Amino acid sequence: MKNIITSMKLTAEQKQQLEQLAPDYQIISDGIQASSEQLANAEVLLGWNPAFATLLDHDNQLKWVQTFSAGVDSLPLEQLAQANVTLTNARGTNAENIAQQTLGYMLVYERKLYSILLEQQKHRWNRDHHFSELTGKTAVLFGTGQIGSHIARLAKAFGMHVVGINRHGEALENFDEVTTFEAGISLLKDADYVITSLPLTPATKDYFNADLFAKMGPQTFFINVGRGASVVTVDLDSALRNGQLAGAAVDVTNPEPLPADNPLWDAPNIIITPHDAGFSDQINQRVWQLIIKNVKAYVQGETLNNLVDYQQGY
Ligand code: OXD
């Protein structure tokens, strides 16, 4: 019998739901524990784990992998593409919380909440801060996918001017303007915020480097909620230390976890969060809805949601 293997441990109810949707398959939960024979018979993997990669080195039945993350950069994409495995990701399921965390960084920065919390710990009533606000400020967003457009929607609600940068430069809901990478560079010097939610692909690796930081203004606050390796860490550190940037917030770093002795921890005006923007108490529910929708489509031979284009890498 063919298998559907899930990387997560299913509840009895979830297992039953999958069994009803896919009666011709054996559902194997907690796939890290699966035997090599079970893995060899896996036609579908719901959730990717690096341990599954060995399956591709042997005879296998694999036809479809659904990730629980939006990014697919940690998967063996070349091997999967060569084996004609359909790949779908979980884009959209964490866009709301990542966007909220992004706005969180921006509000902490404008409203001086970080300094004030430090004062609070010392029981100090100090109103002597340069308070500012998001209203009327410009955000340039690299990436206009699910995360980018959620950030854009929230930024618009705070009265910001929102520019999106993508490969096509076509108009999109929630953005005041959308432009291409080439044309967008000239906008960076006036940007109050430059925010990237770009996936990691050969084209975005090390994209945010000294040259690009030099094109931003001293008022620019840089935010990375995409992938750490799209930023050259030492270049970000230098740009903060030499005043080329006003500040930065990064949820993702290169390397990850960021070693305790990495200088970036102590760069001026930086907020570092441990790749947790994607976490939320509502995620499991949203990912489960996607799994159900896609398993249903798969057994009925319909097109799956959230297909990944191997050429683009997202
Ligand atoms: C993701 C992430 O890829 O949270 O989903 O980083």
Image (cartoon, rainbow, N blue to C red):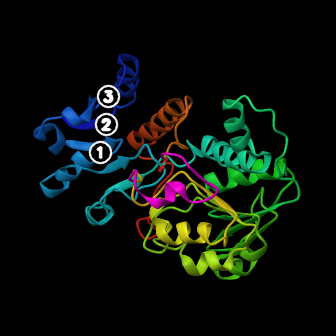
Q: Which residue is mark 2?
A: 7
Residue span colored magenta: 259-274
Q: How far separated are the C-alphas under marks 2 and 3?
A: 19 Å
SS category of the residue bearing label 3: loop
Mark 1 closeness class: few <14, some 14–19, many ≥20 residues within 10 Å = some
**Which disc number belongs to residue 268?**
none
Magenta span includes 267: yes
Give the residue displayed 40% in from the left and 43% down from the top.
298
Q: Position of residue 59 (x, y in %)?
A: 12, 54
Q: Amino acid at mark 3?
A: Pro
SS category of the residue bearing label 2: loop
Give the residue displayed 70% in from the left and 81% down from the top.
183
Q: Position of residue 47 (x, y in %)?
A: 36, 41
Q: Amino acid at mark 2?
A: Ser
Give the residue displayed 48% in from the left and 69% down from the top.
234
Q: Which residue is mark 1?
A: 49
For marks 1 and 3, the one nearer the N-term is 3
Badge 2 vs badge 1, beta-carbon distance below 8 Å:
yes
Give the residue displayed 53% in from the left and 34% down from the top.
283
Q: How far separated are the C-alphas under marks 2 and 1?
A: 7 Å
Closer to the camera in the image, 234 or 80: 234
For marks 2 and 1, the one nearer the N-term is 2
Closer to the camera in the image, 285 or 148: 148
SS category of the residue bearing label 1: loop
Q: Decide: is 190 above or below 1.
A: below
- Where's the N terminus, which quadrant? top left
Q: How far separated are the C-alphas under marks 1 and 3?
A: 25 Å
**Which disc number belongs to residue 23?**
3
